[in-house]
Amino acid sequence: MSEYSIKDKVAIVGVGETTYYKRGQASVSEFRLACEAIIKAADDAGIDVRDIDGISGYANDRNEASRLATALGLKQLGFAGMVWGGGGGGGSAAVGNAAAALVAGFAKYVVVFRALAQGQFGRFGQAPVSKDISGPGAYTAPYGLYVPAQWVALRTRRFMHQYNINTEPLAAVAMADYYHAQFNPRAVMYGHPLTREQYDKSRWIVEPFHLYDCCMENDGSAALILTTADRARDSRKKPAYVMAAAQGSDYRQGATIENAFDYSSSNFKTLAPRLFEMAGITAKNVDCAQIYEHFSGAVMVSLAEHGFCKPEEVMDFVTFENITAPHGKLPVNTSGGNIAECYMHGLELVAEAVRQVRGESTCQVPDCKISLVASGPMVTPVSDLIVHSI
Amino acid sequence: MADDRKYYLPEGLPTPRAQRNGLDREYWEAAKRHELVVQRCKGCGVFQWGPEPICHKCHSFDLGWQQVSGRGRLFSWVRTWNPVHPALRGACPYIVAVVTLPDADNIRMVGNLLGDPNQNPSFDAEVEAVFEDHGDVALVQWKLR
């Protein structure tokens, strides 16, 4: 292993989440939601929020670090970082950046956060209206190709064609998310179970995605507190040590107008080996996984690229039985995820990974020691994280 | 049916315009002449799409444009049912195609697949470019060969 590593040098010691709302139902501003989640995370960590001295964000978060530091009265700010890109691909990368800042000595307590009130700002699933368009969008928008559901559907369809996969793995992901959410009072879809018949009869959004294959649109905020391993030992709750993190992209995956070099890839082919090398484990050692599902179809691709199964084995591996807690071979998205807990751009998945290794999940995997997070398949950059208990 | 319409999709979607920096002006001018061109490096000959001011292979800044046959293969396609733009209300479903161009290093282009929006075309089916004139711009569209 490289001498340069963050393995076990930092831990997630605090998790804070606001109430998760359907889009438009939060009665307070997005910025206030961010402040609330950060304060809750500091409380969970057992620290004074004013002791936070680093802020790590992603997805072009509107709630800028200097405004947050000022509003929260932070004594000093030693690190403020933002992951490039507007999607959920930066979720684990924001944790990785926080870890790097801690190991570098830039800060002592870094908060990773995401605040999102799609009811107060634009919707990701609807195009902005303009008379003219130039740049890469000029080659797609005039054809009605506008939103992530379509980009991911195009890639998913190609993957399904390549490996002779039908829509059963997609249904398994959506059904597992809704199943897990029924145990999770935080989940927006708690108390709203989904039957297979409802799933099958739901309207198409973009083939092969039914309504329930798509993430929700939500208002809320989530935050995590990271600190160094020596400080983590004094924290209130069991620390979730960062075993490894990786971020980035494969060769020319950012090529525009649907020219990503490896089109049907989830973009983890070079990240996953780096991730597992740093962690010193293989996919077999992972007890549960939180795999970003903006759309159900991307999960099977991500699972294959992390070595949980081969692409040729997707039909056998990605089944409801295999991916549900507590006894599935690999429980996936045990909080309900982006589809049934909350679309907090995947930071809720990192929070769930922490709960699993703390033993606090509402769908606890027995004796869970290691949880993996994969953030934002089929975009660039994407990112990965493994947390574990020691 | 799409065949009865003037255009495959209704008017009201944004009009494509060349970038002000001139990067892709030749593509849009060629489209008006019903010619399909792709950016190509004058140094190493590699095709590149979308256009950039530098060749990704040899890093030459001397890039030109190569006319291609307009014959391609259907690499992937999706049928959209949810109107993602106000102009698309009442226009769903419609098909968006991603097409590879074998005579341009298999770079991919996007368009609508003309014809019945409920068709289920085969992956890798042969397609060809046709041009849809919208006033002072033309859109490349695709139809099965």
Image (cartoon, coloured by chain):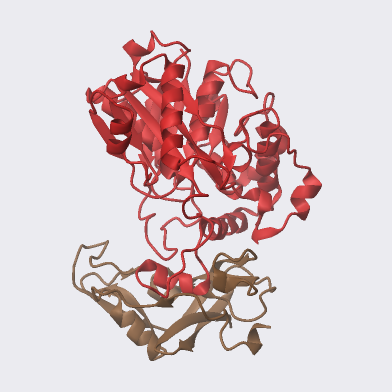
Q: Which chain is red?
A: A
Which of the image's four quarters has the N terminus of chain A?
top left
x 70%, y 46%: residue: A171
Q: Colour of chain B?
A: brown
x 73%, y 38%: residue: A192
Which sits in the foreground, B72 or A326? A326
> Where's residue A30, x and y in %?
45, 41
> Where's residue A66, x and y in %?
27, 37
> Where's residue A132, x and y in %?
39, 75
- Say above or below: B114 vs A298: below
- Say above or below: A144 vs A300: below
Instruction: Locate residue A274: give its quadrant.
Output: top left
- Say above or below: A182 vs B60: above
> Where's residue A386, x and y in %?
45, 27
Which sits in the foreground, B3 or B105? B3
x 35%, y 82%: residue: B28
